[in-house]
């Protein structure tokens, strides 16, 4: 017969030795940094939001959040109705899908939104779990 076939398993190319895990990790980090640089985002891959400082000082900058609520079985309508009377909540509706109720909260800042959710929403009977989504305007 002929010569046995050469094993190439684990090689990254013809005649090359396999890359070690640390080398692959460095290569992946370098590629990600290059993509961020090309996209103009620099080293911070997070979302940057610029706020108008004058509007914040005047107090007319309102924050809005959508609160997704899981209610105890059979309590979705009761939770939605109870939330409609809470100050700071502009709307609350029972919905279908993964969550049972969605509420729209408005306040002056993020801390006030958090306080509203912890002190008002989570204390309503039948509220099992909440997920808060801050609106970006």
Image (cartoon, rainbow, N blue to C red):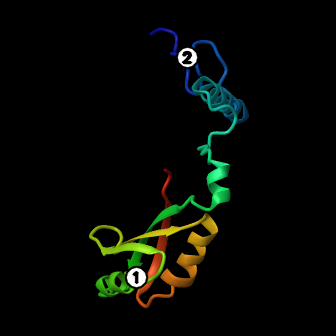
**Residue at 33% in and 84% down:** 81
On the image, the x and y values in percent for residue 120 come to 52, 83
> Any mark on residue 83, and which?
1
On the image, the x and y values in percent for residue 39 come to 57, 27
Q: Is 137 situated above or below 116?
A: above
Disc 1 secondary structure class = helix
Disc 2 secondary structure class = loop
Disc 2 target residue? 6
* Left or right: 130 as drawn, with respect to 13: left
Foreground pick, 63 / 10: 63
> Any mark on residue 11, and which?
none
Q: Quadrant of residue 69?
A: bottom left
**Residue at 64% in and 16% down:** 16
View extreme (front): residue: 58
**Residue at 48% in and 81% down:** 121
Few, some or many C-alpha atoms within 10 Å of disc 1 (few <14, some 14-19, many ≥20)? many
Few, some or many C-alpha atoms within 10 Å of disc 2 (few <14, some 14-19, many ≥20)? few
Q: Is 54 situated above or below 12?
A: below
Q: Nearer the viewer, mark 2 or mark 1?
A: 1
* Left or right: 56 as drawn, with respect to 2: right
């Amino acid at each position: 017969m002929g010569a046995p076939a050469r094993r190439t398993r684990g090689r990254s190319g013809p005649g090359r030795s396999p890359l070690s895990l640390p080398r692959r990790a460095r290569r992946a980090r370098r590629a990600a940094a290059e993509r961020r640089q090309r996209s103009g985002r620099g080293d911070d891959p997070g979302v940057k939001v610029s706020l108008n400082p004058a509007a914040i000082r005047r107090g007319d900058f309102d924050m809005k959040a959508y609160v997704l609520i899981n209610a105890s079985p059979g309590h979705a309508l009761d939770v939605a109705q109870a939330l409609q009377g809470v100050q700071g909540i502009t709307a609350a509706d029972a919905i279908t899908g993964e969550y049972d109720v969605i509420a729209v909260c408005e306040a002056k800042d993020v801390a006030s939104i958090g306080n509203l959710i912890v002190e008002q929403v989570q204390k309503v009977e039948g509220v099992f779990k909440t997920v808060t989504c801050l609106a970006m305007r």
